[in-house]
Image: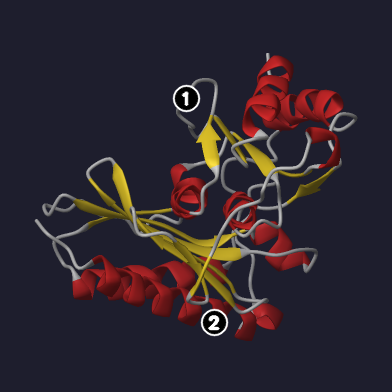
């Protein structure tokens, strides 16, 4: 089944902006729910309301499409197209007011990502991409970092804050931090789109979920960022991204530390 990917991007970007506006408007009155997988895996009523807003509009526009959504509003479909949705990536930052967060929407055809949007509500920035069509920030083309040496590079780090992954991240950072210019810990989607925009020279993400990285990965790839993991393909277990000239060294250091 063919799909107008520009129309899909327009819809996704509009929904992401609407969800982001809701998040800003309701930040002072949000209510926290029970933690999910562990004590640091938090969710609010705003996460749930944002997801419902996005999923309902997608189902209205394309009722045969499947959805995978972090807060449980997914469903099966028969079209061969699947929307991957993280309505609020970085809930801990959002709730505590200590950093950025984003709204993430990706569209897959089978196993292939075809369209992606990541919206930063606080900054008013919408990153997007279409498969083989390049990446955009607020409608303007994006190009990743030119790739300084690792000793000068700014590296983004993302990881799930469960006890096991924190120990794993600690091992990697203990080896990597003395070797790179500096690091920034940010949510996974923004880690990837900041690489696409050249704000970060590289990054890594540990133990994510598909909805954390699906949209950001396509945008990064379309901006010229090299992506991989333990092998040539990145995964939710390990995603390494960098400017092409920096990627081999960064990947080698991360892989050696992540044993």
- Would residue 190 appear left or right of 220 to someone viewing this image? right
Q: What element carries label 2?
A: helix
Residue shown at 34% from the left, 76% from the top:
10
Asked whether residue 158 is in view, the answer is no
Q: In which quarter of the image is the C terminus?
A: top right
For label 1, the crowd category at 10 Å Cα-Cα, with few meaning under 14, some 14 to 19 and many 20 or more, is few
Q: Name the residue under label 2.
A: 22
Residue shown at 64% from the left, 57% from the top:
194
Q: In which quarter of the image is the N terminus?
A: bottom left
Give coordinates of residue 179: x percent, y percent.
Answer: 86, 29
Mark 1 or mark 2: which is in front? 1
Asked whether residue 65 is in view, the answer is yes
Cα distance between the residues tagged 1 and 2: 39 Å
Q: Name which of mark 1 and mark 2 comes first in the sequence.
A: 2
Q: Where is 64 relative to 251, above or below?
A: below
Give coordinates of residue 40: x percent, y percent.
Answer: 70, 46
Among the 4 quarters of the image, the one containing residue 159: top right
Q: Mark 1 points at which residue?
A: 232
- Would residue 227 appear left or right of 167 to someone viewing this image? left
Give coordinates of residue 108: x percent, y percent.
Answer: 29, 51
Residue shown at 68% from the left, 35% from the top:
246
């Amino acid at each position: 089944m063919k799909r107008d990917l520009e129309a899909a991007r327009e819809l996704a970007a509009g929904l992401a902006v609407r969800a982001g506006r809701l998040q800003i408007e309701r930040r002072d009155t949000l209510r926290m729910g029970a933690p999910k997988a562990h004590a640091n895996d938090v969710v609010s009523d705003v996460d749930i309301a944002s997801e419902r807003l996005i999923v309902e509009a997608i189902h209205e526009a394309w009722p045969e499409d499947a959805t995978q959504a972090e807060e449980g509003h997914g469903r099966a479909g028969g079209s061969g197209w699947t929307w991957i949705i993280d309505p609020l990536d970085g809930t801990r930052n959002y709730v505590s007011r200590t950093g950025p967060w984003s709204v993430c929407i990706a569209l897959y055809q089978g196993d292939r990502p075809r369209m992606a949007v990541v919206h930063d509500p606080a900054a008013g920035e919408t990153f997007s991409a279409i498969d083989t069509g390049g990446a955009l920030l607020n409608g303007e083309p994006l190009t990743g970092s030119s790739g300084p040496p690792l000793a000068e590079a700014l590296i983004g780090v993302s990881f799930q804050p469960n006890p096991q992954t924190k120990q794993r991240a600690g091992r990697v950072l203990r080896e990597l931090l003395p070797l790179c210019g500096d690091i920034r810990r940010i949510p996974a989607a923004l880690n990837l789109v900041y690489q696409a925009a050249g704000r970060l020279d590289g990054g890594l993400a540990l133990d994510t979920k598909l909805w954390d990285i699906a949209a950001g990965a396509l945008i990064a790839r379309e901006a010229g960022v090299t992506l991989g993991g333990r092998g040539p393909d990145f995964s939710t277990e390990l995603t390494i991204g960098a400017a092409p000239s920096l990627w081999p060294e960064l990947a080698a250091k991360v892989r050696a530390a992540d044993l």
